[in-house]
Structure formats: structure tokens, C-alpha cells
Image (cartoon, rainbow, N blue to C red):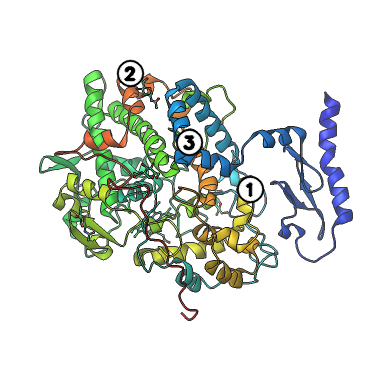
Amino acid sequence: MWLSTAAKGMWPFVVVFVCQLVTSSSATNPCCSYPCQNDGMCMTTGHDTYMCDCSNMDFYGDHCEHPTLMKRIKTWLRPDTETTHYLLVEPKYKWIWNIVNNLTFLSRRIMKVIYMLRADVLDSPPIYNSAHSYVTLDAAFNRSLYSRILPPVPEECPTPMGTKGPKELPDVDLLIKKFFTRTKFLPEPTGSNVLFSYFAQHFTHMFFKTDFQKGPGFQWGNHGVDMSNVYGKDKAAENRLRSFKGGKFKMQLVKGEEYPLPVSKTGAEMVYPKHVREEHKYALGHSLFGLLPGLFVYSTVWMREHNRVCGILAKTHPEWDDERLFQTGKLIILGETIKIVIEDYVQHLSSYNYQLLFVPDVLFGEPFQYQNRIAAEFNHLYHWHPLMPTNFNISGTVYELKDYMFHSELVIKHGFANVLDSMIKQRAGLMSHHNHGPGTLHVLRDSIIHQRQLRFQSLNNYRKRFNLAPYTTFEELTGETVMAAELEKLYHDVDAVEMYVGMIVEKRRHRAMFGSSVIEIGGPNSVKGLMSNYICSPQYWKPSTFGGEVGFDIVNTASMQKLFCQNIKGKCPVVSFRVPDYDENETIETWDGKLPHDEL
Ligand code: HEM
Ligand SMILES: *[C@@H]1O[C@H](CO)[C@@H](O)[C@H](O)[C@H]1NC(C)=O
Ligand SMILES: *[C@@H]1O[C@H](CO)[C@@H](O)[C@H](O)[C@H]1NC(C)=O
Ligand SMILES: *[C@@H]1O[C@H](CO)[C@@H](O)[C@H](O)[C@H]1NC(C)=O
Ligand SMILES: *[C@@H]1O[C@H](CO)[C@@H](O)[C@H](O)[C@H]1NC(C)=O
């Protein structure tokens, strides 16, 4: 036994020796060219030598290039990601999934495999953050930084992407003008509506919280699904929203419906521009959620749901005080959120015909880490601003961005049910090139600049990290020739294309909302973030955590439809993330294939 361990321990030294003989001498860090394959760890062993550490991997060899026999068999048995995706979304295979969805045992089995395979791709605990281009202890302990999926490109490398591409990356404004700016609204081809866009924004902003004052690598959240988007960032913020009666939020009644209170009545810390009238500055869980009426809608409906749940808990537990009702209500709301995110939201965005499930118990007894860290790359790939249409149409009144930004009161003015109905009926934008509306171009600009400051590796390096084939040509990346030619002029080498820019110009996957990179890189981060939540652990995941069977049942049967319809006055529409008049065979408007001229 000890012999084999010793032999394993010797292995890296053998590799060092070999590599020191084979590398050519050059002044720069030899790891800049990313010589190690299959996520093998590159470490310099002198000024111009390196080793690839393939320990604990399914690969061996000087550059971790050889798969083990087991890995070969696994790869051979497992269909590639494109085939899997095709089987999952293509209508002609729908009948298979209809059967699978009905077989509880089988569909739970599949769900377990999805959870495990997706989560397994990520480092847990994390090993990198943006402060260092190598493994540090700080990456795991210091929670004030986002983690990193891949470490920053070392400062001393000859080009921003290592050794490939130009010494200076293309001008940001030129990129924005050529590839990002919306000239004509491009609708989302799978039929997504604005209710979907706002869900994405409202949900993810509880953990995508960059501390811009400290820098783009810093964050002020809790690295996961903590419901701070509804309850506030900390205890003090939470207390300002509470009534301290029956566990409920303090809310006001307007036309018989509950709404959040104005800031002046709560002392909540909210960010509003000066021109907003005092009574229209509402106190919400997130300081920036006054920004858009859709965020106000979601904040309101979750607060109503919390109060509704507390009412039910108070009936089953007359012995409980305000604090216990509040705390248990919050656990239920968190459970409902994950249920809805997986079974309604991710279900929609995946376009899968397989019905996804939220079943934490399938992971019990499996090697699974109930801890999570938000990666800077995950935040950036979630910049889905093209989803936002240029205008917002509420019951036939069309508002421009400037007229609805910071105007939460429009929701009360038009009525909650009407606004909900409008959000369902209005089509979202295609998350792709030439579709950033004028209101979000400055956000895009900042985020490209931040990605450069954070020294993100190339899109192709991220693709390799997530077991996707790197693109070999620009045409293969974009699936066309016009943008491809222009990108080639700017980046010289397809291995130098930046992560986010690449994701936006990338060709769309068959019947999907995005290209394969957003899906295959976002997917693991999303699944891990949801299923590693503390409430999914065997110690939390039981009825008593949620106030008994009644509360556990609320979690296990939650849906978008119920969330809205149990908390709304008047006629409740069919609540869906897809516009009601969606036709899967429609011919939609796509990019006209023209690029703006060179001059800015
Ligand atoms: C018209 C609607 C929207 C506007 C005006 C808007 C505006 C903004 C602004 C001002 C920022 C701060 C970035 C900075 O200062 O550099 C931001 C960040 C962000 N937005 Fe949006 N946004 C909108 C819609 C969305 C949607 C639909 C999503 C979908 C998920 C989204 C995702 C994000 C993310 C992930 C961040 C980064 C947050 C952070 O790092 O703290 N946004 N947005
Ligand atoms: C699934 O099962 C239910 C009840 O057993 C049945 O009504 C339904 O038709 C089945 N669906 C499919 C697609 O087989
Ligand atoms: C976390 O890392 C940042 C950047 O390196 C540093 O400024 C900060 O002091 C660290 N925080 C802790 C608690 O160590
Ligand atoms: C606004 O939405 C209503 C339906 O809610 C629709 O009848 C109308 O055509 C829309 N107007 C515009 C300009 O999109
Ligand atoms: C779309 O086209 C397919 C094949 O032509 C057809 O089977 C399907 O019913 C159509 N869907 C709609 C919503 O019309």
C-alpha cells in the first residue's frame, strides 16, 4: 500500500525532469503559452522551465495529454455534449422524454447524474481568485473576493491572453459599435418574455454583487442563494423591513393589495436618483432594486408570499413567536426559490424536453460539497443585457427606458395583475451580438474593461476547462463569415478571443437561447450554486426545518404559477416564461449580416 503511494508521490518529479530537458529557453514565463493539457497545472521550475502537474487526474504524460484507460472508456461511453444537447431539445425525440418524465425512478436517476456531473467540474473548495495567477490559501479563505474558475493570465506574459493574439486587445468602443450595439430589436427565438429577463436579474443579483469601490474582483454578497434580494443584505437591513408581528414584513395596503413601504417609513438604504419623489422610493431587499419596475414586481410578490406563508405557519404553530415564524418563513421562501429556479426558470432556459427536478435527497450519501463560491467569470457570463427590449409596454402604454427606470410606482398605477400580464406578453431580446439596447451599453463597456483588468483567459481556454472543443477558426466560432473576418482582423488568433466577447458572437446552439459556451460554462456554476445550498444538505432537508409537512409541502409544490396567483388580486393570467403567442415554427428577425463602418 505505502509503496504505491510513494510511487504516486514520485511522479511529478519525473515530469519536472523530463520537461526541463524539452523546453526551449526564453525569458518569459513558460506557462504563458498554457502548455499543459486537460486542466493539468502548469508550474514554473526556474526562469524558463515548467512542469505539468497531473496528480489526481484522469490524465498522465509530460503535458497531461494521455487519458487513462478508465477515462478512455468513460469518454467512449459518454455521448459528446452536442449530441446530448440535441437529444434533449430536438422535437423529434420528445416522445422519449415524455416517457422518461413519467418514470419517477428513472428521471430521479438522471437528475442525480446531472447534479453530480455538473457540480464535479468546479473546484470546491475554490483554489483561485483574481489576486493571484496561482493557487493560494487566500482564494479559499477570503470571501470578500469572487473566486475564479481559471486564474488570471500572469502579468508578465507577452500578450493579454498569454502568448496568442495582439499585444493590446481591440478598442472597446470599436468592439461595442461593431458587434454589440442594437440597431433593430432582435427577439429571443425560443419565445422568452420579459418576465423571464426580470427573473434572471432579480434572482442573480442576490449573489452577483460586485464591490466596485474596491475593484472588479471584490464582492459584497454571501456567495450563494441566501434570499438577500428579498430580505436585505444583513440583519440590520432585514430588521428595517420586518413588522415584528407574526413573522411578517411591514407592508402597506394599496387598493387591497400589499406593497413595500416607502424608504421614509423604514429607513432602508436604497439607491435612488434625486429626482425620484420620496413616496416613490420603495424599501426593497436590494439597494438597487428601485432601478426597474420588473424588479419591484418580483420583490413585491416574494414579500407577499413570505407574509402568506407566515400566516399559514401561525395557524399550524400557535405556539411560535414572531422570530420563529419569520425565520421559518425565510427557509420556506428559499426552498420555494430553488424549486422555481430549477423547475420553471432553468427548465425554460435549457429548452430541454426532459423535465428537470429539484430533489436534493438523491445526493444524500454521495460525495458532494455543501459549499459554494461565486466565480467572477460566472458573474460576467450572466451579463444578459440583450434580453432587455428597448421599451417596456405596459397594457398598451409604451415606456422608454428613461421613463420607466426608477419608476416603481408604475406597477401600482397600472395595477399588479396588468403589469404581470404585460411582462408575460412582451418578448425578450436575443442574447447575442448586435442586440445591446442603448440603456445598457455603458454597463457592457464597464464589464469588458473589468474583464481585462481581471485578466480573464481566452474563451478557448474556458471551453477546454469545461470539456468543450476549442474553436479552431473564427468561422467556426460565429457560424458565419462577416463577423468572423472582422474578428480575425482584430484578434489575429481565435485562441485570443476574449471570454465575454466570444460568448456574444458565438453561434447559437440548436433550439437554444445561447451558444454552447454560456450553457456549458454557466450550467455547472448554476447547478452547483443551487444544489450545494445549505438547505439541500441532509441535516436541513426535512419537514421540521420548514415548520412541518405543511411548510415542506409548500416548498415541494412551488411554481411560478402559484407564486403569482396566490398573491394577486383579480384575474391571474397563465404565468409562463414564454410569450403566449409563441410559435415554434415562426420565422423571426435575425441580424441583417451588416457591420457598421470602421470609423467611430
Ligand atoms: C434595462 C435593464 C437593465 C439595466 C438598466 C441594467 C443596468 C445595470 C447596471 C447599471 C449595472 C452595474 C454595472 C456597472 O456599474 O458596471 C448592471 C450590472 C449587472 N447586470 Fe444589469 N441591467 C439591466 C438588466 C439586466 C438583466 C436582465 C440581467 C440578467 C441577468 C442583468 C445582469 C447584470 C449582472 C449579472 C450585473 C453585474 C452585477 C454585479 O457585478 O454586481 N442586468 N446592470
Ligand atoms: C404520464 O402518466 C400519466 C398518468 O399515469 C398519464 O396520464 C400521461 O398520459 C402520461 N404521459 C405520457 C406522455 O406518457
Ligand atoms: C482579502 O483579499 C484582499 C485582496 O488581496 C485584501 O485586501 C483583504 O485584506 C483580504 N481580506 C482578508 C480578510 O484577509
Ligand atoms: C403593447 O402590448 C399590447 C398587449 O399587451 C399590444 O396589443 C400592443 O400592440 C403593444 N404595443 C406595442 C407598440 O408593442
Ligand atoms: C411546427 O412544425 C412541425 C413540423 O412541420 C409541426 O409538426 C408542428 O405542429 C408545428 N408547430 C406549430 C406550433 O405549429
Tell me the crowding category of disc 1: few under 14, some 14 to 19, or many 20 or more residues within 10 angstroms, Cα based.
many
Q: Amino acid at mark 3?
A: Tyr
Position of residue 24 relative to residue 515, above or below, is: below
Check disc 1 and report its element: helix, strand or loop. Answer: helix
Between circles 3 and 1, the one closer to the viewer is: 3
Name the spot of residue 414 as percent of width and height, x first. Answer: 15, 51
x 27%, y 45%: residue = 580
Kind of residue sitting beneath label 2: Glu
Q: Nearer the viewer, residue 464 or 167?
A: 464
* Front residue of this view, candidates 506 and 38: 506
Q: Which residue is mark 1?
A: 465
Which residue type carries mark 1?
A: Arg
Identity of the residue drawn at 68% across and 33% down: 74
Residue on which the image places disc 2: 549
Q: Earlier in the sequence, mark 3 or mark 2?
A: 3
Which residue is farthest left? 255
Q: CA distance from mark 2 to mark 1?
A: 42 Å
Instruction: Using the image, tell me which numbered label, if any, was put on residue 93.
Output: 3
For this rendering, which residue is in front, 105 or 203? 105
Does 160 sit left or right of 415 as displayed?
right
Position in image of residue 485 (x %, y %): 58, 70
Sequence-wise, which precedes: disc 3 or disc 1?
3
Q: Residue furthest bottom?
A: 599
Q: Residue 274 is drawn in which quadrant?
A: bottom left
Please state if 111 lies on the left or on the right of 329 as rendered: right
